[in-house]
Every structure is written in C-alpha cells, then in structure tokens.
Amino acid sequence: MDLLFYSEIFRNLSVAKKNGKPAPHKAILLLSVIDLVASSDIEDERILYSDSLRKQFVINWDIHVESCSPFQCIMSTPFYHMSSECFWDLVPIKYGMEPPKSTPSESLIKRYYKCARINEDLFELLKTKESRDCLREVLITKYLRAES
C-alpha cells in the first residue's frame, strides 16, 4: 500500500452528512493522529484514546470547523466509527467482550477498548513529512472546505 492508496481511502471515508455538509469528525480525528505522529506523541500503530489525542482533536476542531457548524466537537463517535474504515481497528480489552449497541461514549470506549490500531504501512507513511502533508491536504480539502 502506498500514498496514492491512502489518499484515495481518505478521500472516500464513510461520513454522515448534515445540511449537505460532510461530518468533519473523522477528518479531524485523522488530522489529530497525523499531528501526534509528527510530534512523536504517537510512536507506533497504536492510537490510544488519550488526553493528548483529545486535546489535539479540540485544537483541530477549533481551527477547521466553523463555530456555527451543525456538528458537535465529540471525539468518541469518530474514534469508534473509524473502525468501518479498512485501516483502523479497535483492539478490545478482552476478546469476546462486546460493547452494548449504543452511541459510543468516552466511557464505553475506555471500558471496552485498549486502543485503536492503524495499518503498519499507513503508520510508516505518517512518519514522513511529505506523506503527512499530502494526506492532511486530502482531508482538509474533501471534508473541511466542502461546499454545501
């Protein structure tokens, strides 16, 4: 898998729409992961549901999402629903332990999952500035500058 592959995957994330606009949550989460890989706060494929990730999510939300947006700044939903994408898996605390079928809250994620894990080849790409810049631009252009 290469940068072209992940650029296309990022361009085609499964996102909800509201008032004709794509939900920014997955893009903001991925931008936050990219930022934390760049700063070496994320050192391998494991993405912890951590304070540093939450803080970076809020920072990116404030930068990229208008205050009049119909969307709310909630990280638990994209963290959970990103598992529908081919590069993101949730790692359960105990195999066979299934969370209830409800809206994924922060407490539910912390209770049922150790972390998320991204593909190793994606992590390797994110370690290079050129790849990070390219994927960042895909996310911003497609989901955060979208015309209604």
Image (cartoon, grey):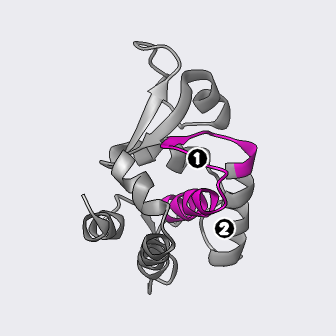
Displayed quadrant of residue 125: bottom left
Residue farthest along the bottom direction in this orientation? 147
Q: Which residue is mark 2?
A: 61
Q: Is residue 101 above or below residue 6?
A: above
Side of 25 where 8 appears, left or right? left
Q: Position of residue 91 (x, y in %)?
A: 46, 28
Q: Is residue 7 left or right of residue 125?
A: left
As drawn, 11 above or below 25: below
Q: Of circles 1 and 2, which is in front?
A: 1
Which residue, given by chain and number where applicable, does mark 1 sit on? 43
Q: Foreground residue, 105 or 70?
A: 105
Task: Tell me the crowding category of disc 2: few under 14, some 14 to 19, or many 20 or more residues within 10 angstroms, Cα based.
Answer: many
The percent position of residue 59, horizontal first and vertical second, equals 73, 66
Residue 22 x %, y %:
44, 70
Query: Mark 2 belongs to which amino acid?
Result: Trp
Q: Are marks 1 and 2 in contact (CB under 8 Å)?
A: no
What residue is shown at x 49% (from left), y 13% (from top)? 94
Determine whether 51 is above or below 32 in the image: above
Residue 19 appears in the rendering: no
Look at 31% across and 64% down and name the residue there. Answer: 6
Q: Position of residue 60 (x, y in %)?
A: 66, 68
Q: Amino acid at mark 1?
A: Glu
Q: Which mark is residue 136?
A: none
Q: Residue at x 60, y 63 (%)?
A: 38
In the rendered image, the quadrant that contains the N terminus is bottom left
SS label for mark 1 = loop
Upstream in the sequence, badge 1 or badge 2? 1
What residue span does the magenta drawing correspond to? 25-52
Can residue 5 be seen by looking at this rendering? yes
Q: Quadrant of the C terminus?
A: bottom left
CA–CA distance between discs 1 and 2?
A: 23 Å
